[in-house]
Image (cartoon, rainbow, N blue to C red):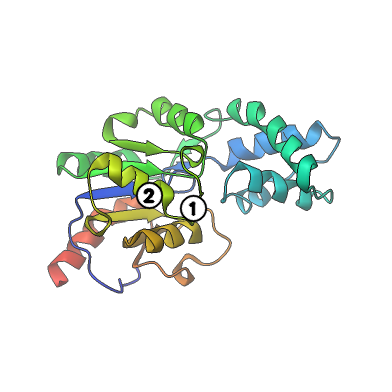
Amino acid sequence: MKGASKPFGSPRAILFDLDGTLIDSAPDIAAAVNELLAGRDLPPLSVDRVRAMIGGGVMKLVERAFAASGSPLTGSVLEEANRDMAPIYRRHLTGLTKLMPGVREVLTHFHLNGTAMGVATNKPQLATREILLHFHLTEYLGAIVGGDAVTNLKPAPDALLLALDQLGVEPYEALMVGDSISDVGAARAAGMPVVLLRGGYTHVPVEELGADLVCDSLLDLPSAMRRLRDAA
């Protein structure tokens, strides 16, 4: 665990990223990407290659996938591919996706402690809600904000601020938990402390992304926060 730059005690609310934080969706996302590529007679990409492309929304994923296949797209052709991706993406939401370690235990812990919780993700709103319903996680969440519910995707703060508004909590009273540089950027722009988890979707070592705290998994989050509160 990396030490925090400033203690943040017991937040009134915690916002979670989705992909790479609450769920391991890379196998499903890779299946969707490869179905899209196959429709254009392009070879499939490995799950590991697709995992490194996740972040920044579906359009960015499509752009990266075609570039990796040696057939980069721009402009209207990229927009067309993104439109084709939409129904494919919706067919690959929960078939291969699994919860990250400790998700249910940690959400239960904070729920019982009276901490408000929400999800702020770049994944589309309907897809996000379908996944959370599939895993029976919506009962823990007072706010669910997808990328198409706001004007600007993370690392802009829009999704975080909307989720906090729905929870009735100010940014300084809340904590962001994610796995990538987009989560750090969004949290900083919103004026929130941020915790990153190892094992998510980043090709840069998570310790180098500038978070206040780095944990091995969600299971470490409650005890790490207690230690920070006690040391404050």
- x and y percent of residue 137 in the render? 34, 32
Percent coordinates x, y for residue 132 in the rendering: 40, 31
Per the rendering, the mark at residue 160 is: 2
Disc number at residue 200? none
What residue sits 33% from the left and 30% below the top? 138
Q: With 78 as the anchor, is 224 left or right in this view? A: left
Tag 1: amino acid: Lys
Q: Residue at 80% of width from left, 48% of height from top?
A: 69
Q: Is residue 29 above or below residue 194?
A: above
Distance, label 2 to label 1, CA atoms, is 9 Å
* Residue 134 against residue 5 in the figure, above or below: above
Q: Mark 1 falls on what kind of element?
A: loop
Q: Dot 2 lies on which element?
A: helix
Observer-nearest of 195 and 149: 149
Q: Quadrant of residue 4?
A: bottom left
Q: What residue sits 59% from the left and 49% below the top? A: 54
> Do residues under tags 2 and 1 come within 8 Å of each other at their CB atoms?
yes
Q: Position of residue 193 (x, y in %)?
A: 31, 62
In x, y percent, where is residue 106? 27, 44
Q: Is residue 203 left or right of residue 62?
A: left
Q: Which residue is mark 1?
A: 154
Q: Is residue 20 left or right of residue 83?
A: left
In which quarter of the view is residue 23 placed? Answer: top left
Up-down relation of residue 119 to residue 157 (above or below): above
Q: Amino acid at mark 2?
A: Leu
Q: Is residue 20 left or right of residue 76?
A: left
Q: Residues within 10 Å of mark 1 (few under 14, many from 20)?
A: many
The answer to whether residue 102 of the structure is visible from this angle is no
**Could you say which is closer to the camera, residue 172 or residue 43?**
172
Nearer the observer, 34 or 188: 188
- Residue at image position (51%, 49%) is 153
Say which quadrant the N terminus sits in.
bottom left
